[in-house]
Amino acid sequence: MAKKTRKTTPVADVKTELKANMIVSVDTTIDNSAAADAAALSELLSELDGDNMLDMAMNSGEGLLVPVGDDDALEAVLEAALADGGLEHGDEGGAEIKVDAPDEKPAKQKKEKKAKEPKAPKEPKERSALRDHFATPSQKVAAHLGDAKGEYLLLNMDDAMLEGEALVERQASIAAMLDDKNPKTWKLAQKEKEKAVMLFGYLKKGGQLNEVMRRAFTLLINEGELTSGDKGNLQQDLLKKPYSIGTARSQANQMFGLFQALEIVTKSEKGKFVANPDSLILAKVKGMLGLQ
């Protein structure tokens, strides 16, 4: 019988094809010492000749154990097989080589979070005197009038003629009257001061005038005078709202005190107060209420 001649293939091509046909399996019982595997394999390779090594690679059900990354060990197996002629080009039965792979996955690196830049602190808002419980009546009036203080913090025609230091002194005296807390000297009681603040706010900003003040101004402009007492025209008008007798009496007395202090009226006789023709406040309110 004629001897069958084997067809050989260059080493580089065989290596490539062998690597492509290998079934790489992961042994679940991995020895964590790759160095020990490499040493054992090296000793084994030194004792085996090409035929034995090839048989082990081709026929052993267990295959050869080659540690991951040990290219030298893999190279030795291939060289021994090729030198012996144990591999042919197109050999379908490739040797199964088991590769030890570590079961530990590399730890993921956490991305460093960039520190947020601190926000600049907000500047505290200036508190309005109108919302400040401790603000004086004159401070609240000044908050209402703003830059128009020189135009509105005036009481009569003579005040309108003042300039410079004289005007400043006059307005300072009006502010002092609003802030006076001495019952023996004050011209305005506490409730009357509150109504004075509301009145100056209305003069500057408009809007809706306090109901009691609206009735008092309307009555004064239409009749030319206000009379006090339970039978007086102001109290009788307030009862028509209707306010209770106690509320009407109290509110009427506040109007008499406010109108006298702000020179809106002058007292002609007991219980009778007539409109002051020189009152700047009365003239302005008359126009704002649309009364002639």
Image (cartoon, rainbow, N blue to C red):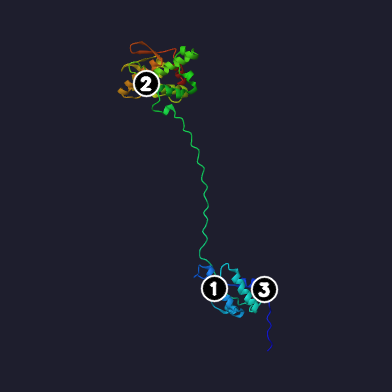
Q: Mark 2 points at which residue?
A: 192
**271 left or right, relative to 17:** left
Q: Distance between the residues labelled 1 and 2?
A: 109 Å
Q: What residue type is labelled 1?
A: Ala
Task: Residue 48: give x, y in percent of width and height.
Answer: 58, 78
- Between label 1 and label 3, give the one nearer the viewer: 1
Closer to the N terminus: mark 1 or mark 2?
Answer: 1
Kind of residue indicated by mark 3: Val
Image quadrant assignment for residue 252 = top left
Residue 200's image quarter? top left
Image position, residue 102 (x, y; %): 52, 66
Which image quarter is the N terminus in?
bottom right
Q: Mark 1 points at which residue?
A: 40
Please identify, in this view, whether the residue under mark 2 or under mark 3 is nearer the observer.
3
Disc 1 and disc 2 in contact, CB within 8 angstroms: no
Q: Can residue 190 be seen in this view?
A: yes
Question: Where is residue 234 shown, x and y percent of the image?
Answer: 35, 18
Query: Which of pointers 1 and 2 indicates the residue nearer the eye?
Result: 1
Which class describes the residues within 10 Å of circle 2: few (<14), some (14-19), or many (20+)?
A: many
Q: Mark 3 points at which residue?
A: 11
- Counting other residues with Cα less than 10 Å from the Cα at mark 1, is it few (<14), some (14-19), or many (20 or more)? few
CA gap between label 2 and label 3 equals 114 Å
Kind of residue sitting beneath label 2: Glu
Assign a secondary structure to mark 2: helix
Q: In this view, does 44 lie above or below 126?
A: below
Res 214 seen here: no
* Pointer 1 or 3: first along the chain: 3
> In the image, is residue 126 above or below residue 109?
above
Q: Determine whether, in the image, residue 110 is placed left or right of residue 263.
A: right
Could you say which disc has been placed on residue 65 in the image?
none
Above or below, comparing residue 184 to residue 23 in the picture: above
